[in-house]
Image: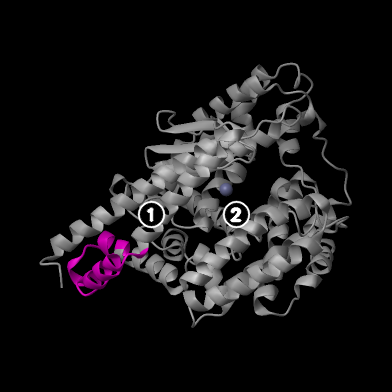
Amino acid sequence: MKYESVSQALDALNKHQEVLSAYNHAIGVVYLDAATAAPKGTWEGRGKTVATLSEITYNLETAPEVGEMLDWLQLHMEELDPVQKRQVEVLRKSYDETKKIPADECIAYSVLLNDAQAVWEKAKNDNDFDAFAPYLEKIIAFNRKFAGYYNPEMEPYDALLNKYEEGMNTQTLDVFFEKLRDALVPLIAKIQEVPQIDDSFLRRHYPVEVQRKFSDYLMEVMGLDRNYCGIAETEHPFTTNFNNKDVRITTHYYEDDLANSMYSVIHEGGHALYELGADDCYNFTVLQGGVSMGIHESQSRFYENLIGRSRAFIHAIFPKVKELFPEQLGDVDEEMFYRAVNKAEPSLIRTSADELTYANHIMIRYELEKQLIGGTLEIKDVPAAWNRLYKEYLGVDVPNDAQGCLQDTHWSGGMIGYFPSYALGSAYGAQMIVKMEEELGDVYADVAKGDLSKVTGWLKEKIHRHASFKKPGALFEEVCGKFDASHYTDYLTRKFTELYDL
Ligand code: ZN
């Protein structure tokens, strides 16, 4: 074998990760530029660059030398430290996943996804599910097949879930979603029968330039260091990270909707704090960055909802909100503002759902994906099944497929098994705050003074600093004990019973 010593093999391991990290950084900057600053007409050259860079990274990741290096290191695992072991493990998983898919299927699938994206956009615009159906059919078939490559011992949908949330399975999720459904469906129905909250003042005119100042203020309150965290404006808000000293968030301003960008900034700011809080040692390795979608969403939703939609937080920021928007909020007090940003209302569109009803949108998608991959639901029956579940879980009638089963980009993008992470994240967060208060006492007293240092300090110590070193399930259990969704349902029940005086 070509390595003469462990240290020689580790040099190769480090070099490999540095090179991969550099290519990913470059690709990420190109994407960020495309979403934020690049003029419309510049897409062609960028497409070529991204294709070339992606091909290079694919070849780098799957090179036979990498397989040999991993084989060699796996024979010497007892000589590696825990971080190096985890690096080998993560690289091996992605190497196997990529290598197991035959090249011709891999190419056919990326061509399919490329076409599906355009077909889906048009189908959504034209409210024409039949146009998208044959593509969805093929995407489901590919995913079922790939699931067997990823992990032949697992049920296909479990293997897909594992791509996004290592260790997750339908057994856990069935229990989780059943618990949510039993608690939330009646609660949401009850709210429909009582007087609704007035949030109309959030739709007055809020100029973008003042909203930008508001974002700066929110980032300051969150403790986001602007030397390391930038903010830009895009169609859809997102966070992108290059290393623990370079994270970017984006938002979208609507002049007739104050809460929209406000909560985008806090949500993406939560993702950013996770990335910025990682220990330096993980930079430029495969362990850099948050460990899973579920843990990532637990952080973003923690700041967005458990902090950002708390009375304490609204109390802290309300004087500044009034100062920035004296005319728009002249007749509004702190309690009215708190109630308005917490208004719960069953709706058709997942991305604009409130804190209470959000999880129901997810359980519908979970139910359908499970049946599609399991082969118990035919593609042509998706719209009817979708509409039936929206009626059952949210009490709303879906008027058309554009606002129904065609609304999300995930299926056309091949991301089957991704949705559950959103709901899991919210539930993880609700259990984290219980643990945090057990250890630190009433953290909201500090939040009410605009001081989030205790909250962020605890999350950094328990979650952020570990980056991807620990597996998501193990990380969560070490911090919170066994996952128990009743923390989440209890929290929502308590909060909305009080809010709506049920
Ligand atoms: Zn998010």
Would you place residue 291 above or below residue 331 in this image?
below
Q: Which residue lies under the disc numbered 2?
A: 426
**Taking 454 as reference, is 146 left or right?**
right
**Residue ID at (53%, 71%):** 105
Q: Is residue 80 magenta?
A: yes
For disc 2, the neighbor class at 10 Å (few under 14, some 14 to 19, many from 20) is: many
Would you place residue 286 above or below residue 324 in this image?
below
Give the Cα separation between the discs numbered 2 and 1: 37 Å
Looking at the rendered structure, the kind of residue marked 1 is Ile
Question: How far across and down, in percent of the image, does residue 108 sit?
Answer: 56, 67
Question: How far across and down, in percent of the image, does residue 290 sit?
Answer: 44, 52
Looking at the rendered structure, the kind of residue marked 2 is Ser
Question: How far across and down, in percent of the image, does residue 58 sit?
Answer: 40, 59
**Residue ID at (46%, 60%):** 476
User: Could you tell me how many numbered marks the image carries?
Assistant: 2
Please provide the residue range marked out in magenta: 62-87
**Residue ID at (21%, 75%):** 75
Task: Name the residue at the left extreme.
Answer: 4
Q: Which residue lies under the disc numbered 1?
A: 56
First in sequence: mark 2 or mark 1?
1
Would you place residue 421 above or below residue 155 in this image?
above
Which image quadrant is residue 141 in? bottom right
Task: Name the residue at the bottom extreme.
Answer: 153
